[in-house]
Image (cartoon, rainbow, N blue to C red):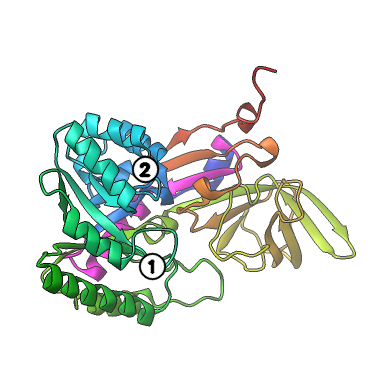
């Protein structure tokens, strides 16, 4: 169990800490609830720091940028477990991947241009690439149905193998009806493809968008939700089904620690300044701190309650972590531990704004702590060279 006081004393604030025991238990929980026939794909964009710890627990890693590929490659992630995705695939990166790994990774196709690029490079290096065309859900990602049918008709079978299709329509899907509608659509579409084109769709990679409930007062019966979702998935017959999951795998393993550094009161209320801010802490659906996330306040003690506005260190009126939070009376150096920040917070924040340092990242594994990123000065990145 993480000792947050130890984290503060030895590593300081602000900082992220990721509990790998919680992470792996979370994956096992999802496997048990969804069933062993469904392979899990981890979306690396959710949190790069925990990727290596998932290598033996998930079937694939969804990689959406050159930087994510570089990270996974340096971590020695098995290239057979890589799915090279992303709405923009530049030729230099894809050629480098093929030179390094040949036909081992799998690729998504988000446009006919991407197909042409993969075909060109597979011919150049005389290798056969396995691909999953991504079907659009009505946004800038993926190809439409007509393009999918065209691609299946024209693809070069000597250098490209179409294994199936990929579909992802967004995150935080709270509605089982929506999930069922999407699965029904994919079942109908694959049946149409197989009938009209005489082409077997062997695999469906489905971006589940499973929800994470971040805020106090929200109720979520996850056991029942996943049980119902499994019934929906079971409607897909005789196909390999892989489930791309990022947020739902990573969120629960992470905590963010930030310290009270100043306090003030005016006619609009009590304002607390933290040494972190919205450049570090990102919750999906948070609007100007109007919702209260799950948190722990250190030190633990009984005291009279007060109401505060928790603000970060950025020079913008938007930097509210939480508004109108009622808690025990605060003092400078008190610590807030915000929970469920394992997904996106460390990668999605406006990290370069005001040239403030990036927090340390700490992994908790095997009852010990390991710093996997030291505090990083962003002023170096914002400094104008050659002036």
Give the farthest residue toward the top: 386
- Disc 2 vs disc 1: Cβ atoms closer than 8 Å? no
Rendering quarter of residue 352: top right
The picture places residue 199, in percent across and down from the top left corner, at 11, 64
| Rendered-image quadrant of the C terminus | top right
Q: Residue at x 81, y 61 (%)?
A: 270
Q: Position of residue 386 (x, y in %)?
A: 65, 17
Task: Name the spot of residue 212 as percent of width and height, x first.
Answer: 44, 66
Q: Give the crowd class for mark 2: few <14, some 14-19, many >=20 residues within 10 Å.
A: many
Q: Is residue 155 magenta?
A: no
Label 2 SS: loop
Q: Is residue 191 left or right of residue 317?
A: left
* Magenta-highlighted residues: 11-38
**What x and y, as percent, mark residue 295?**
57, 60
Q: Quadrant of residue 376?
A: top right
Q: Nearer the viewer, residue 313 or 148?
A: 148
Q: Secondary structure at mark 1?
A: loop
Determine if the magenta segment contains residue 34. yes
- Residue 242 appears left or right of 65: left
Q: Mark 2 or mark 1: name the one nearer the start of the chain.
A: 2
Q: Residue at x 39, y 78 (%)?
A: 221
Q: Is residue 106 visible?
A: yes
Q: Which residue is mark 2?
A: 89
172 lies left or right of 261: left
Q: Residue at x 29, y 67 (%)?
A: 145
Residue 137 numbered mark, or none:
1
């Amino acid at each position: 169990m993480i000792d947050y006081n130890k984290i503060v004393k030895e590593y300081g604030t602000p900082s992220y800490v990721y509990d790998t025991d919680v992470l792996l238990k979370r994956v096992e929980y999802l496997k048990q609830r969804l069933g062993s026939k469904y392979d899990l794909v981890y979306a690396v964009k959710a949190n790069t720091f925990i990727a290596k710890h998932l290598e033996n627990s998930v079937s694939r890693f969804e990689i959406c940028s050159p930087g994510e590929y570089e990270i996974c490659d340096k971590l020695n992630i098995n290239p057979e477990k890589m799915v090279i995705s992303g709405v923009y695939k530049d030729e230099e990166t894809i050629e480098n991947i093929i030179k390094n790994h040949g036909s081992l990774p799998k690729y998504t196709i988000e446009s006919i241009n991407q197909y042409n690029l993969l075909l060109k490079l597979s011919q150049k290096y005389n290798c056969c690439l396995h691909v999953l065309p991504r079907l659009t859900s009505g946004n800038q990602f993926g190809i439409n149905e007509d393009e999918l049918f065209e691609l299946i008709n024209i693809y070069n079978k000597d250098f490209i193998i179409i294994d199936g299709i990929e579909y992802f329509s967004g995150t935080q899907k709270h509605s089982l009806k929506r999930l069922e509608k999407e699965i029904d659509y994919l079942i109908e579409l694959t049946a149409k493809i197989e009938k009209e084109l005489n082409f077997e769709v062997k695999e469906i990679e489905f971006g589940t968008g499973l929800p994470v409930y971040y805020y106090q007062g929200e109720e979520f019966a996850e056991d029942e939700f996943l049980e119902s979702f499994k019934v929906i998935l079971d409607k897909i017959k005789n196909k390999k089904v892989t489930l791309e999951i990022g947020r739902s795998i990573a969120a629960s393993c992470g905590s963010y620690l930030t310290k009270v550094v100043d306090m003030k009161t005016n006619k609009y209320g009590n304002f607390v300044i933290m040494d972190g801010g919205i450049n570090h802490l990102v919750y999906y659906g948070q609007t100007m701190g109007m919702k209260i996330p799950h948190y722990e306040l250190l030190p633990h003690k009984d005291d009279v309650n007060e109401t505060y506005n928790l603000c970060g260190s950025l020079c913008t009126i938007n930097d509210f972590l939480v508004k109108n939070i009622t808690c025990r009376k605060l003092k400078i150096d008190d610590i807030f531990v915000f929970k469920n920040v394992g997904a996106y917070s460390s990668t999605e924040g406006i990290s370069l704004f005001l040239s403030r340092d990036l927090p340390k990242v700490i992994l908790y594994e095997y009852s010990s702590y390991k710093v996997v990123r030291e505090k990083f000065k962003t002023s170096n990145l914002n400094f104008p060279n050659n002036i």
